[in-house]
Image (tube, helix red, strand yellow):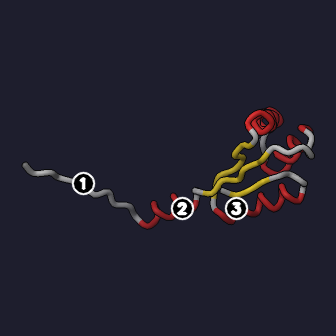
Amino acid sequence: MTVETQEETYTLDEVLATIAASHKLVLWNDDTNTFDHVINCLVKHLQYTETQAEKIAWTVHNEGKCIVLEGTYTEVEVYRKILKSEGLTVSVE
């Protein structure tokens, strides 16, 4: 009996794309910020619509957190700093 295995190969660009997009910006629930402030920040800085931002705010409220952005570490870190400067509780995963 012979067993054949197939090895998967990836190009450097495919590997880098996977690594680059693997960072997530997480918005956490807190007892400080109002729904309106969170929504306004998401619209102003992440260009969400009012409806999308409101849905995110409810997700954060009900589930404790929500991923609001995925991208490169640099991109996600820039937005983490911006949202943190607005008083929001955010982290990068």
**Kind of residue at badge 2:** Ile
- Residue 34 is situated, as x and y percent measured from the top left of the image, at 92, 40
**Which residue is rendered at x = 33% and y = 60% of the image?**
9
Image marks 2 and 3: residues in contact by CB distance under 8 Å: no
Provide the residue designation for mark 2: 19
Q: Is residue 23 above or below residue 60?
A: below
- Comes first in the chain, label 2 or label 1: 1
Indicate left or right for 6 with 17 as reference: left
**Kind of residue at badge 1:** Gln
Q: 68 or 64: nearer the eye?
A: 64
How far separated are the C-alphas under marks 2 and 3? 13 Å
**Kind of residue at badge 3:** Glu
Provide the residue designation for mark 3: 75
Which of the numbered marks, if any, corresponds to residue 6?
Answer: 1
Which of the numbered marks, if any, corresponds to residue 61?
Answer: none
Q: Is residue 13 above or below residue 59?
A: below
Q: Secondary structure at mark 1?
A: loop
- Comes first in the chain, label 1 or label 3: 1
How far separated are the C-alphas under marks 2 and 1? 23 Å
- Residue 61 is situated, as x and y percent measured from the top left of the image, at 80, 36
**Which residue is rendered at x = 38% and y = 61% of the image?**
10
